[in-house]
Amino acid sequence: MSTRPSLVVVGAGPRGTGFLERLAANLPELYGDRPLDVHLVDPHPPGPGRIWRTGQSPLLWMNSQAEDVTMFTDETVRLEGPVRPGPTLAEWAGIDGRTFPTRPLQGSYLRWVYERARAALPASVTVHEHRTSALRVAGPREGRQRVWLEGAAAPLPADLVVLTVGHLDAEPDREQRALADFAARHGLVHLPPDFTADTDLSALPAGEPVLVRGFGLAFVDLMVLLTEGRGGRYEGEGDDLVYVPSGREPVLHVGSRRGVPYRSKIGYALDGERPPLPRFFGTGQTDALLALGRPLDFRRDVWPLVDKELGWAHYHRLFSTHPERTVLPWDDFEKAYGAAEPRGAALAALVAAAVPDPADRLDLDALDHPLDGARFASAEALQDGLRAHIAADLARRHDPAHSADAAVFAGLLSVYAQLLRLGDRLDPGGWWHGFFSYLASGPPGPRLRQLLALSRAGVVRFLGPRVTVGTDEERGLFRASSEAVPGERTEARALVEARLPDPTRELTGSPLLRALYEEGARATASGLLVVDPADGRVLERDGRPHPRRFALGPHTTARAGGAFTRPRTGGVAFGQNDVTARAALALLRDLECRLPAPLSA
């Protein structure tokens, strides 16, 4: 067996590629021309990985504009290592930066980034690609690790291991198992939570009703693949867009907790004076929360700070850019706002006195529950009401007169940066992430215009808010209802769960992470691998960082916000990659004994 120093990276998608880029950037300073084997383990192509693979439908878009996607560092990123600038997706592809590129195009960009990072490694580094899955990591804390691969008789030896496995699958929970069993007994179709692009949709028949639970981005993908993906097309543009069916589409009856789609992407740039952020939820407030020395309750300890920070962003922009819609001097408002308790009666009274039009006030609770208390006389009245809601959202999110909404988006990004520091001290049961996605990560405006056209064509039907899905054992059907339309029920022989899997600690679909948890790695209740925020080392249940195991990405407590980094925004993920790459290289350089430990199962 080779005794060359060996680094194993499990996961060669965007995060693994980003780590490799930082490894190449830091290697001359910290490791020189010493020999090194780098093993990349991923069943999918290095660079794009699974989610961004180039073979998926070109009808599927990114949820970011091309100018907002980069894989390269700039001077705004806090780094110990060198800055290595490179093109954004828009610059690399030579396309309009305001467009929403296809996912295959993003996959090609990621493959190019991977090839560039690999080419930047010196000849003393040998890269080995393993197109398979890692099943288990074993080995003593102070000795060489062993990475067991699917289909391999012997493990890979590793002086250290970096896990960049990305988004994970999950085993079905009790409800999903019961629904699957019901479907099997009655010959129905049940599609559990999954990545929509990976789901076999051929079982959904043309012209038949399909219940869809979930109204986020997974639904948008489903909508695209079952309409344009089956030969339909759009004619016209804007508010006059018309969908021309192919006749092969099912009828999608969609509902969710809110009953409405995610808010549209903002269709203009935030120019002029920007809100100075952070103001009420910054480093000082986060330090104070961390100093409490106890588990944090999101609603009690954190949400009031988030609410006040987002309100600050909103009203600062409103007063500075649209002062004609306010009636108090800014200095007076700012002083009173700063002194008021978050979410208190005094703050509400101040806003009501200063901002006459309720449409100009920020009400996060109303945004989160847009149809609370709404009742519709019929299913058709609900369709009209939802179309009006979506059209109003589109109009507002593309109108610079409401640029306070764009300021709130900036506030959301600022808040997210502080929440990242709280790590595993904060686990709000997924509510915050869902709310953030609803406000900040909605679909491009054109997708919502397509949704309206599909609704007018009868291909999409809205079920309403707080939708409940049940089964009719006697008739052998799924059924759905919403309290917004009393007495109305929709029945179907097919049910699609339009959402991503929820890989909790008990239900993770990754044998690798399951084995780590069983061995003693620490995890949150929601299944996130707990890592040391200082350098990404995996923490064990006793709180000790494992000296030879690191992890980066959305499967860890060191999250970094969106899927990709916007240029010149500080690049939290880039900083994490840099710190981990430098720690890995320092460890490899300083190891005195490179002989492998005796292997055992």
Image (tube, helix red, strand yellow):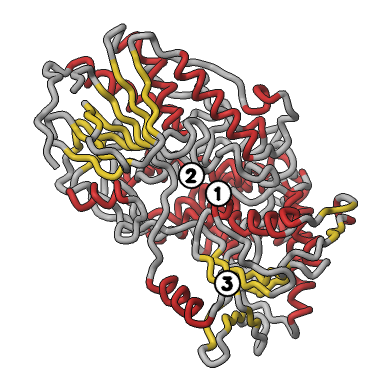
Choose the circle earlier in sequence order: 2 or 1: 1
Q: Is residue 336 left or right of residue 591?
A: right
Residue 54: give x, y in percent of width and height.
60, 37
Residue corresponding to mark 1: 310
Front in this rendered view, residue 407 or 541? 541
* Residue at the limit of the structure toward the bottom, as seen here: 474
Comparing marks 1 and 3, which lies closer to the viewer? 3
The residue depicted at 54 percent of the width and 28 percent of the height is 111
Residue at mark 2 to residue at mark 1: CA–CA distance: 8 Å
Residue corresponding to mark 2: 415
> Looking at numbered disc 1 in the image, what kind of residue is underneath it?
Leu
Q: Are marks 1 and 3 in contact (CB under 8 Å)?
A: no
Comparing marks 2 and 3, which lies closer to the viewer? 3
Residue 393: give x, y in percent of width and height.
73, 57
Front in this rendered view, residue 198 or 429? 198
What is the quadrant of the N terminus in the image?
A: top left
Q: Quadrant of residue 149?
A: top left
Comparing marks 2 and 1, which lies closer to the viewer? 2
Residue at mark 2 to residue at mark 3: CA–CA distance: 36 Å
Bin the neighbour count of mark 3 within 10 Å (Cα to Cα): few under 14, some 14-19, many 20 and up. Answer: many
Dot 3 lies on which element?
Answer: strand
> Looking at numbered disc 2 in the image, what kind of residue is underneath it?
Val
Q: Is residue 114 left or right of residue 538?
A: right
Choose the circle earlier in sequence order: 2 or 3: 2
Residue corresponding to mark 3: 495
The residue depicted at 48 percent of the width and 77 percent of the height is 184
Q: Are marks 2 and 1 in contact (CB under 8 Å)?
A: yes
Residue 280: give x, y in percent of width and height.
47, 44
